[in-house]
């Protein structure tokens, strides 16, 4: 079987164009370190490891831990039944090496990734390995797992050296696997250097180191500032970074989120604005005849437990956003990956059912977390906005020069920066222990039931989303 390749501006297989359409697996291998640490403290390292990924001490026949249950053959079968052909697998570097033992591969570092890649291959699903976190954090996003809004990855060369080393190990491990479409080497980088110099240097190194051990797989390069900005990339990118490279945008439409200032009705004006944003994101690549891949996108969805009678109305509008974006992509034969296959009910194609052990046990905590809007992703802050607005106004008052309030990254408004730091880092930090404490006293049988909540058999399907995807699959 042949490797997929970049041929000019398109992906090909044996010189025939191919379009990858699929989803990201989500938070399966990206659990933040604060969560793991808190669970270690409450359950003890052995039980915490049991819940996440270790061998069942009860010697049960079926897997009982979270990482095994999250994606099984049932998930692969369902995904392929929709006609989709690619899964982007987000991984945390900490699955492969420890900060306390750098540049030493964990003995079982590839265990779970191997299993899911092989399951996908069995059912003719390509995979793209997405390095979602880097040592020190490659952005100030919570998903970079740096524990701060300052991306320290760019400040310490040793972090970058470790990152290049790790990618050579991953590429060496998977160099012969033709069902892997390629490597998305760093998710949503945010290099604050005004010319993106450190990101360009990192890509220089990766685009030499990876092909040196694996010359066949595609390399997917995100734009700077959360995959939105290519303006300082080199004009000779094809010569500098190679021909077998695709460039990744993340085309989230504001119309698909609670903070949208208007309800999406699919008007000509709204469609024109949606298209203009999309065209702007890919413009740099189009001007140079380079290959574009939309590595993340898609709306979030209302939940009846929180949004009540408005749920269907909200979601109908969000499905319209999804369809209209897909219409744009279809005209460009764009390969794409919506962000999320599975979650607990906010964006996934499938989600953990409300009557499962996990959702029942954590119901009150999840409601509190929603009300406090401590999740940065798609938060609805209507219940707490009045708490943070005075901080925003205070900064406006003491820093009256607007130009002095424009900090990196520019896509974070003053309000975004205040709420990210004070709400989704500070307040959220205080809630981690409360979440972990809900596990306190549970034995392995109870932990097994929680983990099994994430199994496909215990999940519901978001039929509206899946219908749209099925209608737009290859």
Image (cartoon, rainbow, N blue to C red):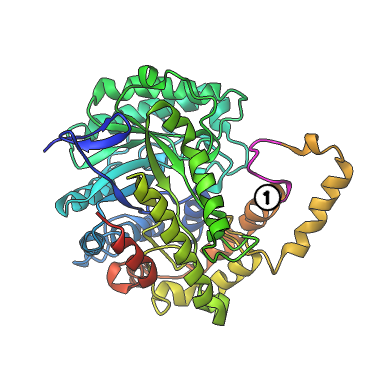
Q: Return the residue nearer the eye: 329 or 464.
A: 329
Res 173 quadrant in image: top left
**Is residue 134 among what the camera can see?**
no
Task: Establish if 111 lies above or below 462.
Answer: above
Q: Residues within 10 Å of mark 1 (few under 14, many from 20)?
A: some
Would you say residue 410 sits in the magenta stretch?
Answer: yes
Q: Residue at x 55, y 48 (%)?
A: 142
Would you say residue 361 sits in the magenta stretch?
Answer: no
Number of marks in picture = 1
Res 447 quadrant in image: bottom left
Q: Return the residue nearer the eye: 151 or 136.
A: 151
Considering the whole magenta stretch, tell me its main secondary structure.
Answer: loop
Looking at the rendering, the stretch of residues picked out in magenta corresponds to 407-416
**Is residue 118 among what the camera can see?**
yes
Q: Return the residue nearer the eye: 106 or 190.
A: 190
Q: Residue at x 27, y 49 (%)?
A: 86
Res 103 quadrant in image: top left
Task: Establish if 298 lies above or below 12.
Answer: below
193 relative to 126 in the view: left or right: right
Question: As drawn, which residue projects farthest toward the left?
Answer: 1
SS at mark 1 in the image: helix
Q: Return the residue nearer the eye: 380 or 284.
A: 284
Task: Measuring from the top left, give residue 405's x and y in whole percent.
Answer: 77, 38
Task: Establish if 318 lies above or below 209.
Answer: below
123 relative to 31 in the view: left or right: left
The C terminus, quarter of image? bottom left
262 relative to 321 in the view: left or right: right
Task: Measuring from the top left, give residue 9's x and y in whole percent.
Answer: 33, 32
Task: Measuring from the top left, give residue 244's x and y in whole percent.
Answer: 29, 27
Circle 1 is placed at which residue position? 416
Task: Measuring from the top left, give residue 27's x and y in whole percent.
Answer: 42, 54
The N terminus, quarter of image? top left
């Amino acid at each position: 079987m042949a490797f997929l390749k970049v041929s000019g501006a398109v992906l090909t297989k044996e010189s025939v164009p191919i379009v990858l359409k699929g989803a990201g697996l989500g938070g399966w291998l990206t659990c933040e370190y604060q969560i793991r640490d808190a669970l270690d403290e409450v359950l003890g390292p052995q039980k915490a490891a049991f819940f996440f990924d270790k061998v069942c001490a009860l010697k049960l026949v079926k897997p009982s831990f979270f990482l095994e249950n999250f994606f099984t053959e049932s998930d692969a079968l369902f995904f392929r039944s929709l006609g989709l052909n690619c899964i982007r697998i987000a991984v945390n570097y900490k699955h492969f090496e420890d900060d306390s033992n750098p540049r030493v591969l964990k003995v079982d570092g590839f265990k779970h990734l191997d299993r899911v890649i092989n399951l996908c291959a069995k059912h003719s699903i390509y995979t793209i390995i997405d390095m979602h976190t880097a040592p020190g954090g490659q952005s100030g996003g919570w998903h970079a797992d740096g524990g701060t809004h300052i991306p320290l990855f760019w400040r310490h060369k040793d972090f970058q050296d470790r990152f290049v080393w790790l990618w050579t190990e991953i590429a060496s491990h998977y160099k012969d696997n033709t069902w892997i479409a390629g490597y998305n080497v760093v998710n949503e980088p945010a290099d604050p250097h005004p010319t993106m110099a450190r990101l360009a240097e990192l890509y220089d190194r990766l685009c030499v180191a990876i092909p040196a051990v694996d010359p066949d797989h595609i390399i997917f390069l995100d734009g700077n500032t959360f995959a939105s900005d290519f303006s300082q990339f080199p004009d000779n990118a094809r010569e500098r970074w190679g021909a077998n490279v695709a460039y990744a945008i993340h085309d989230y439409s504001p119309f698909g989120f609670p903070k949208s200032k208007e309800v999406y009705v699919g008007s000509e004006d709204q469609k024109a604005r949606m298209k203009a944003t999309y065209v702007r994101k890919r413009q740099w690549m189009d001007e140079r005849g380079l290959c574009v891949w939309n590595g993340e996108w898609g709306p979030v969805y209302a939940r009846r437990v929180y949004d009540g009678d408005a749920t269907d109305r909200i979601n109908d509008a969000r499905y319209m956003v999804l369809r209209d974006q897909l219409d744009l992509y279809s005209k460009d034969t764009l390969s794409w990956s919506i962000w999320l296959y599975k979650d607990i009910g906010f964006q996934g194609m499938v989600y953990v059912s409300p009557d499962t052990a996990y959702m029942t046990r954590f119901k009150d905590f999840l409601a509190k977390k929603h009300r406090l809007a401590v999740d940065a992703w798609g938060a609805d802050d209507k219940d707490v906005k009045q708490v943070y607005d005075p901080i925003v106004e205070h900064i406006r008052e003491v820093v009256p020069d607007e130009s002095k309030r424009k900090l990196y990254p520019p896509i974070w408004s003053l309000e975004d920066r205040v709420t990210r730091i004070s709400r989704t880092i500070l307040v959220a930090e205080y809630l981690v222990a409360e979440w972990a404490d809900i596990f306190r006293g549970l034995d392995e049988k109870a932990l097994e039931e929680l983990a099994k909540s994430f199994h496909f058999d215990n999940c519901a399907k978001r039929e509206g989303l899946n219908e749209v995807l099925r209608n737009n699959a290859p």
